[in-house]
Image: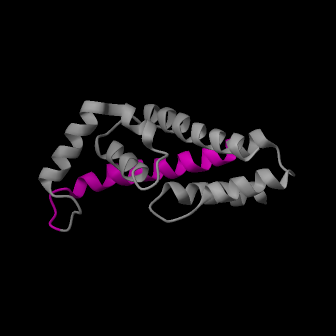
Amino acid sequence: MAYVILFLSALLAATLFPAQSETVLAGLILNGQHAFWLLITVATLGNTLGSVINWWLGRYLEHFHDKRWFPLKAATLERAQQQFQRYGWWSLLLSWVPIVGDPLTMVAGLMRMPLLAFVLVVAVAKGGRYLALGWLVL
């Protein structure tokens, strides 16, 4: 059950919903009843899947960029696209950063970044964060 809770908290934390998967992970590591590497893996998978949801939302929302209610103005969207084209997938190495990471993953979808490349980069970034946190907790 602990792994399911960790997975769900990590998934939610990667979306626009506020959640703290780091505290759940730290608590489970300190508890000492679960395998360290399995905890890191479950948290990484959940958080990466949450980012894939953001990617999909970005990809889907692109269809509405010409609507009045669309949250980004055409000029803002164009600037974001230029920045993403300039830094490309390297910017996704910051996908683990609170507040900044979620929009980055949505922009990757808007920019039609290939899903496989997206998943690989985001999994490395998020897995690295969980691994660093896990080592700090130990």
**What main secondary structure does the magenta stretch of the protein show?**
helix
Q: Does the magenta stretch include residue 50?
A: yes
Q: Does the magenta stretch include residue 88?
A: no
Query: Where residue 82 sits: x, y (%)?
Result: 20, 38
Q: Is residue 65 above or below residue 118?
A: below
Residue 99 lies left or right of residue 44; in this view the side is left
Q: Quadrant of the C terminus?
A: top right
Residue 112 lies left or right of residue 3; in this view the side is left
Q: In which quarter of the image is the N terminus?
A: bottom right
Give the magenta range.
41-68
Query: Where residue 36 sits: x, y (%)?
Result: 78, 42
Displayed quadrant of residue 28: bottom right
Residue name at image x 63 percent, y 43 percent:
130
Query: Where residue 80 sits: x, y (%)?
Result: 23, 45
Q: From the viewer's side, name the closer residue of 37 and 113.
A: 37
Q: Is residue 90 above or below residue 25?
A: above
Query: Where residue 7 sits: x, y (%)?
Result: 66, 54
Residue name at image x 56 percent, y 49 percent:
47
Direction bottom: furthest residue? 69
